[in-house]
Image (tube, rainbow, N blue to C red):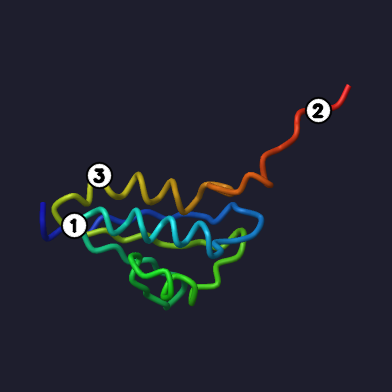
Amino acid sequence: MNGEVLQRKVIVTDPLGFHLRPLAAFAQRAKQFQSTVTVLKDNQRVNGKSPLELMLLAAQQGTELLLEVAGPDAEDALPVLAEMLSAPGIDEPENTPLPPKG
């Protein structure tokens, strides 16, 4: 399975876009896989394991990204990383909706 590149399109849903905290968490998680992780936006390709490169994407809410994963654990990495990319505010407590009043 080593030569195959797995791809998944992902839409950024976080109202703040793919900003520092989630992209740092994404890069940290991507580093735990042996596979190469690449994130594409339009014609821009960046290393998914580099927070600095991920920042260059400046992906706002609604941006379509293409996630590419290739390597021995690509099948495990793809769903985990795709979920992180599309999750609204993965670690943003201030984005948690308040319970309705009354």
In space, the residues marked 1 and 3 are separated at their CA atoms by 10 Å
Residue at 46 percent across and 54 percent down: it is 85
Figure check: 46 above or below 23 = below
Q: Circle 2 sits in a helix, a strand or a loop, which is it?
A: loop
Residue at 60 percent across and 59 percent down: it is 62
Relative horizontal placement of residue 82, taking residue 31 as reference (left or right): right
Mark 2 or 3: in front is: 2
| Residue 19 image position (x, y, % from top left) | 56, 64
Label 3 environment density (alpha carbons within 10 Å; few <14, some 14–19, many ≥20): few
Quickly name the residue at label 3.
Answer: 76
Q: Circle 1 sits in a helix, a strand or a loop, which is it?
A: loop
Quickly name the residue at label 2.
Answer: 100
Figure quadrant of residue 18: bottom right
Disc tally is 3
Query: What's under tag 3, amino acid-wise?
Result: Asp
Residue at 47 percent across and 61 percent down: it is 23
Residue at 75 percent across and 34 percent down: it is 98
Quickly name the residue at label 1.
Answer: 34
| Residue farthest toward the top in the current orientation of the protein | 102
